[in-house]
Amino acid sequence: IIGSIGIIFFMLNFKQMFKSDVDIISYFIYGAMVAMPILIFSDKSLTKIETQRITVIFLLAFFVIFFWAAFEQAGASLTYFAEEQTERHIQLFNWTVPTSYFQAINALSIIVFAPVFVFLWTKLGKRGKEPASPIKQAIGLFLLALGYLIIAFGVTGLAPGVKVSMLWLISLYVIHTFGELCLSPIGLSMVNKLAPLRFASLLMAVWYLSTAAANKF
């Protein structure tokens, strides 16, 4: 544990200590993404079924990178969009909604809609129609794309300097939350089900590594 803390501290402070522009954290993350599959698949004790299951984990983890990389634009380009291209003034109350308030939409949507998704999956599960984990992930990716498509429609044909209604951005955040509720909960349970016992912790780390890579992207 002490060694791990020391390595993390070194990576976080590398630039400052050595006055360097080298992004050592990126090298560590990307290097681990290459090393992990080699390390795991080189184990000769893996059976054919175990190899297939681990392959599924790596494939899903790979596509998760693209989901979170786009989803986490909420704190980057989408915040800029809210600041510069969204009409945030509510004339009825003579009040301008702070840009930071849009960050609460995702959390509020999870609180409101998580029970709905639990009910939906439970209902479908009892009927034997609940989608498999890869299908849920595909639905999540589709909803992510749909959210950005809505924004694209919102800004199409606008003259320079004209701002869009807040409803466009709110719709994007809510739809992205639907995608998150489809994709996010399946990850850890999927790894737990598919991973061979001796690789359970390592493959759980692979799943979190995909999130780290996504945020770095």
Image: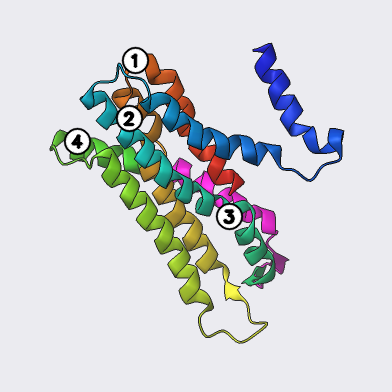
Which secondary structure dominates the residues rendered in magenta? helix
Residue at label 1? 197
- Pointer 2 or 1: first along the chain: 2
Q: Are the two marked residues, 3 and 1, in contact with CB atoms closer than 8 angstroms?
A: no
Nearer the observer: mark 3 or 2; the answer is: 2
Nearer the observer: mark 4 or 2; the answer is: 2
C-alpha separation, residue under disc 3 versus residue under disc 2: 29 Å
Residue at label 3? 73
The reply to whether residue 78 is visible in this rendering is yes
C-alpha separation, residue under disc 1 versus residue under disc 4: 26 Å
Rendering colour mode: rainbow
Residue 159 coordinates in the image, percent (x, y): 61, 87
Q: Residues within 10 Å of mark 4 (few under 14, many from 20)?
A: few
The amino acid marked with disc number 2 is Ile
Q: Are the two marked residues, 4 and 2, in contact with CB atoms closer than 8 angstroms?
A: no
C-alpha separation, residue under disc 4 versus residue under disc 2: 25 Å
Q: Residue furthest left?
A: 127
The reply to whether residue 114 is visible in this rendering is no
Residue at label 2? 54
- Pointer 3 or 1: first along the chain: 3
Above or below residue 75? Residue 155 is below
The amino acid marked with disc number 3 is Gln
- Which span is picked out in magenta? 90-113
Write down the quadrant of residue 133 in the picture.
top left
Residue at label 4? 125
Write down the quadrant of residue 122 in the picture.
top left
Above or below residue 130? Residue 92 is below
